[in-house]
Image (spheres, coloured by chain):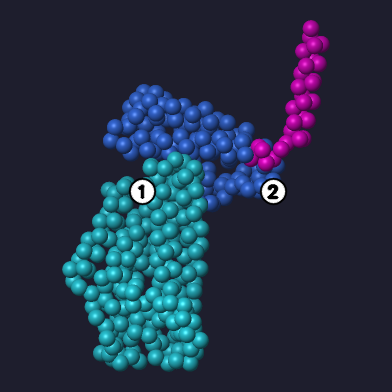
Chain colours: A cyan, B blue
Amino acid sequence: MAGSRIWDLPTRLFHWMLVLLVLIAWQSAERRDISLHVLAGSGVAGLIVFRLWWGFFGGSTARFANFIKGPGAVLGYARSLFTHKEPALGHNPMGGWSVVGLLLVLLGLTGFGLFASDVDGLDSGPFADFVDYDTGRLASHLHARFFDGLEILVALHLCAILFYHLVKRHKLVHAMVTGRQAHLADGAFTPGSRVMLGIGVVLGMAVTLGLAHLGGAF
Amino acid sequence: MKRVYGLAAALAVVIASGAALALDAPSAIKDRQEVYKEIGKSMKGIGEELKSSSPNVDEIKKFAATVDTDAPKIPSLFPAGTGPEAGVKTAAKAEIWQKPDEFKKDAADLAVAAHALNVAAQSGDVAAIKDAAGKIGEACKACHQTFREKEH
C-alpha cells in the first residue's frame, strides 16, 4: 500500500466509535431518551479511559509525549501552515492540542453527566444518587455547557479537516479510516504492545459496563 | 351584623384585586419554582429509595405526601403575567395561557397520579409505589412536552 502507516487500529476504532456514540448521545438527549443517553455516555466514558491509557502505552502516533508540543513548535507550525507540503506523521503540533482540548472537554462533559439530574428528579446520571438535588441540577447545567464546548471544538475539527483537504490536499479522513497517509514515505511508526492494548480495552469496558449498570441499563 | 359581613367581603374583594394588580411577577415565579423544586427533590428521593435493595418506606411516605400536597397547587401558580413576558428567567411557555384547558387537564392528571402515589406509599407496598411513581414521571413529561421550555 502507498504511503506510511500512521494510525494504529485501536486509535482508529476509538475515533470512529467516539463519533458514533457522541452522535447517539446527542440525539438521544434531544429526544429525551435518557436510558439510551446514559448508555451512550457510559460508552464515551469507557472510550476516554481507553484513549488516556493508549496515550501512554499505544502506538507511537497515539502517545501524548509524541504529539503534545510546546508553544515554540506550535507557533512555528502555524507560521509555516501554508508553505510546508508534507503531512505530519501523526498529529501536527496544532492538531495535538486539539486532541488535548477534545479529550478535556469530553472528560468534563461525561464527568458532570455522571452526577446530573433533571428538573423533575426523574432522569439522572449513574452517580446522581450520591449528590443532592441542587448539586445534580448544577451538574446538569455544567454538562450542557461542556456540550456547547464540544460543539465548538468539533466545528473547529471539521473546519481544519476541510482546510487540509481543500488547501493542502491531505486526505485526513482517508488516513483515519485506512490508517495510512499517502504522500508520506514509510516512516518510523511503532505500534503499541498487545498486552497494554488488552489492559486498556479491559479498563475501558469495565468503566462502560460499570456506569451502564449503575445507570440502570441492566 | 350582616352589614359587617358585607363590608368585610367588599373589603376583601378590594384587597384581593389590589393584590392582583400589584402582582409581583418575579416573586410569583420564584414561589412557583420553589414548589416545582420541592416536587423534583421529592421524586429524586423516592427514586433513590426505590433503586436501593431495601427501600426506606418511611422516607418514601414523607416524599409522597409532599408531592400530593404540592401537585394540586400547580394551576394557581401561573397567574397571568408570569410567562415569558415577565422579564425574568422562566421555562413556562406562553402555551400555558393560550391553552388553559389543556394545561389544567395535565395538572389534574398529575394531581391524580400524586394522590395515587401517596396512597400507595402509605400502604407500604413497594411494587405499587414503583408503579405509581412511574405514572407521575409520565404526567410530568406529558405536561413539560407542551408547556415547558426545554432546558438542561
Q: Is residue A51 magenta?
A: no
Residue at position x 79%, y 15% in the image: B6
Q: Does residue B104 appear in the picture of this structure?
A: no
Which residue type does callout 1 highlight?
Pro
Q: Does residue A188 appear in the picture of this structure?
A: yes
How packed mark 2 is, by other alpha carbons closer than 10 Å (few <14, some 14-19, many 20 or more), is: few
Chain on which label 2 sits = B
Residue A68 is situated, as x and y percent measured from the top left of the image, at 39, 75
Q: Is residue B17 magenta?
A: yes
User: What residue span does the magenta drawing correspond to?
Assistant: B1-29
Q: Quick one: which residue is furthest to the left in this view?
A: A195
> Is A208 positioned to the left or the right of A160 in the image?
left
> Is A86 positioned to the left or the right of A10 in the image?
right
Query: At numbered mark 2, what does the secondary structure look like: helix, strand or loop?
Result: loop
Q: Is residue A32 above or below residue B109?
A: below
> Is B152 positioned to the left or the right of B128 in the image?
right
Tell me the distance, in whole angstroms, between the alpha carbons under discs 2 and 1.
36 Å
